[in-house]
Image: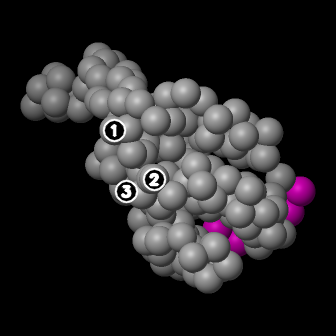
Amino acid sequence: MNKTTRVMPAHKHIALVAHDNYKPELLRWVKENKDALQGHFLYATGTTGRILSKETGLAIKSLLSGPMGGDQQLGALISEGKIDMMIFFWDPLNAVPHDPDVKALLRIATVWNVPVAMNRASAKFMISAPQMAEEVSIEIPDYDAYLAERV
């Protein structure tokens, strides 16, 4: 597939997602990084967003709960170029009823070259990167060229 670029703004659009067993861990990480997150636009799936907003006071756009379609909403935002990065503390030891949605979300993040942190260590590296405060060009699929080839 042909590639093109898109520019991530200096003020990133960050998705925050956590499975039930990892919500406390994500909350702790968000509290520790509240100052760094304040300058960005934050999104979260339903329950996670409500918990994070209530406990930290951060402005977070809450989508539906993951199992109720929130993972798919987030995937749509990624496909539209509206999410720049994702922090997703998922539970690798327990299956969830919406595993297909989770897999689809991770797949679409990979397709659109969205950086994804899946644990505290990778989230720390991402939030600490100098590019967090800069515009960054990333390579993405050239959807217009893709359509032109197919039509």
Dot 3 or dot 1, earlier in sequence? 1
Asked if residue 61 is positioned above or below residue 136 in the image, the reply reads below
Numbered disc in front, either 3 or 1: 1
| SS majority, magenta | loop
Q: Quadrant of residue 115?
A: top right
Give me the residue at 31% from left, 18% from top.
Answer: 3
Can residue 15 be seen from the camera position used here?
no
Residue 67 position, x and y percent, is 60, 74
Q: Which element carries disc 1, helix, strand or loop?
A: loop
Residue at 63% of width from left, 59% of height from top?
34
Marks 3 and 1, how far apart in space? Answer: 19 Å
Q: Residue drawn at (45%, 53%), measured in percent from left and top?
A: 39
Q: Does label 3 or label 2 sit earlier along the sequence?
A: 2
- In this orientation, which residue lies closer to the viewer: 26 or 22? 26
- Residue type, numbered disc 2: Gly
State the residue position of label 1.
9
Q: Position of residue 140 (x, y in %)?
A: 36, 27
Label drawn at residue 39? 2
Most foreground residue, 38 or 79: 38
Residue identified by numbered label 3: 76
